[in-house]
Amino acid sequence: MDTLCGRHIVVTRPEAQAGHLCEAIAARGGVPVLFPLLAIAPASDPAELESIVGRLEGFDLAFFVSPNAVQHAMRFILARRRWPGSVQVATVGKGSERTLAEFGFDAVIAPESGFDSEAVIALPQFAPDQISGRRVVIFRGDGGRDLLATTLRARGAEVEYVTCYRRYCPELDAGPMIELARAGQLDAITLTSSEGVPNLVQLLGNNGLAAVREVPVLVPHSRIAAAAREAGFVRVIETGAGDAGLLQSLDALFAR
């Protein structure tokens, strides 16, 4: 299947999570252009992780916000102890489910569709009569949304955050991407994080943004779409969830 034959598609996921999408683009004949807008590193201070290791049994459920949360938390914890069988594991997004499976976790609470906090709090396991009185630990990066914790607390749960990684804007050369755009050979940009949008604007600079602003930008969530439009991108296309949604929309875009 060569639906993307010769098309240059920018992939902006963190490098460790970009492989699957890059491979799928290449399998369709496209040319993936890796431009990770977020770099990931361990938390500056591991005190929160160190504290939680000996207290895991005190929780009923552990929620991991992303594949990075799984990687950084599980590597730290499992190097020091076994995971207690009494603590259920939950997440959102197929990438996070795959990463948990790599650590041996198959019984994972996760929405079948949707990949945001709204999809999680709609699950029956998080209904007020199910979550009230339960203790939940949320493993996440620095910052992030508070909707999940706020909602669970309102439903009677006790919630604690553990910061296990940090995100920052990497030092990247946007020159080759800008030159592709000026030559009319930059065909699409995939944006998978609203936090990555200001990083892209910063790395492009005013002249670079002017060169790419009319390139189709594919985003899997309305929040990212709003951030992209606010940044000045003209052709913003909302897709289905995850890599599958991005690829389906890329196929449709270039089949015209």
Image (tube, rainbow, N blue to C red):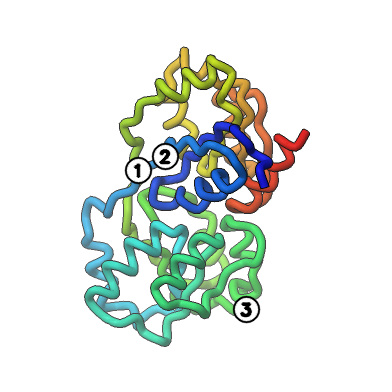
- Quick check: 202 above or below 53? above
Q: Which residue lies furthest to the top in this view?
A: 207
Frontmost of labels 2 and 1 is 2
Mark drawn on residue 36: 2
Which residue is rendered at x = 46% and y = 25% of the image? 177
Which residue is rendered at x = 55% and y = 60% of the image? 93
User: Circle 1 is placed at which residue position?
Assistant: 39
- Quick check: 101 above or below 32? below
Quick check: marks 2 and 1 in contact, CB under 8 Å? yes
Give residue 127's position: percent from left, percent from top.
63, 73
Query: Disc 3 residue type?
Result: Asp
Which residue is rendered at x = 49% and y = 33% of the image? 197
Give residue 143's position: percent from left, percent from top.
39, 48
Give residue 136's position: percent from left, percent from top.
44, 72
Query: Disc 1 residue type?
Result: Ala
Query: Disc 2 residue type?
Result: Pro
- Quick check: 251 above or below 83? above
| Residue 52 visible, this orientation | yes
**In which quadrant will I find the C terminus?**
top right
In the image: residue 253, left or right of residue 63:
right
Which residue is rendered at x = 74% and y = 41% of the image? 252
Mark drawn on residue 129: 3
Q: What element carries label 3?
A: helix
